[in-house]
Image (cartoon, rainbow, N blue to C red):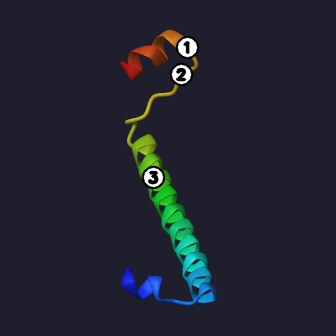
Amino acid sequence: MEKIKNLSFEEKQEVQRLLIHYLREERRDEMYNNYQQSRLEEQNGKLSFTSAVSQLKQLIL
């Protein structure tokens, strides 16, 4: 942390831009992995879909 505090304003902005970029990439990877997992669960019949409110409530509870 001290090293970051000692950076110039421009360097801090660059660190910020890089962090934002890395966080976006990390979140994108997480979303893709979740998608892949959901696809596998759907292919294996582990997911159920419904638009019936009563069934949705039961799934949540």
Tag 2 and tag 3, C-beta contact below 8 Å: no
Amino acid carrying label 2: it is: Thr
Amino acid carrying label 1: it is: Ala
Mark 3 is surrounded, within 10 Å at the Cα level, by few (under 14), some (14 to 19) or many (20 or more) other residues, namely: few
Foreground residue, 56 or 47?
56
Position of the N terminus, as image quadrant, is: bottom left
Q: Which residue is mark 1?
A: 52
Examine the rendered structure and indicate whether residue 1 appears above or below residue 47.
below
Q: Mark 1 and mark 3: span between their CA atoms?
A: 25 Å
Q: Earlier in the sequence, mark 1 or mark 3?
A: 3
Query: In the image, what residue occupies the spot 46% across and 59% down?
Result: 30
Position of the C terminus, as image quadrant, is: top left
Residue 3, given in percent of the width and then of the height, sits at 40, 88
Q: Earlier in the sequence, mark 2 or mark 3?
A: 3
Foreground residue, 1 or 46?
1
Amino acid carrying label 3: it is: Asn
Q: Which residue is mark 2?
A: 50
Q: Mark 2 and mark 3: span between their CA atoms?
A: 20 Å
Tag 1 and tag 2, C-beta contact below 8 Å: yes
Q: Which residue is mark 3?
A: 34
Mark 2 or 3: in front is 3
Which disc number belongs to residue 29? none
Residue 8, given in percent of the width and then of the height, sits at 57, 90
Query: In the image, what residue occupies the spot 37% across and 36% down?
Result: 46
Residue 36, given in percent of the width and then of the height, sits at 46, 55
Query: In the image, what residue occupies the spot 54% across and 70% down?
Result: 25
Query: In the image, what residue occupies the spot 63% across and 87% down?
Result: 10
Mark 2 is surrounded, within 10 Å at the Cα level, by few (under 14), some (14 to 19) or many (20 or more) other residues, namely: few
Foreground residue, 56 or 25?
25
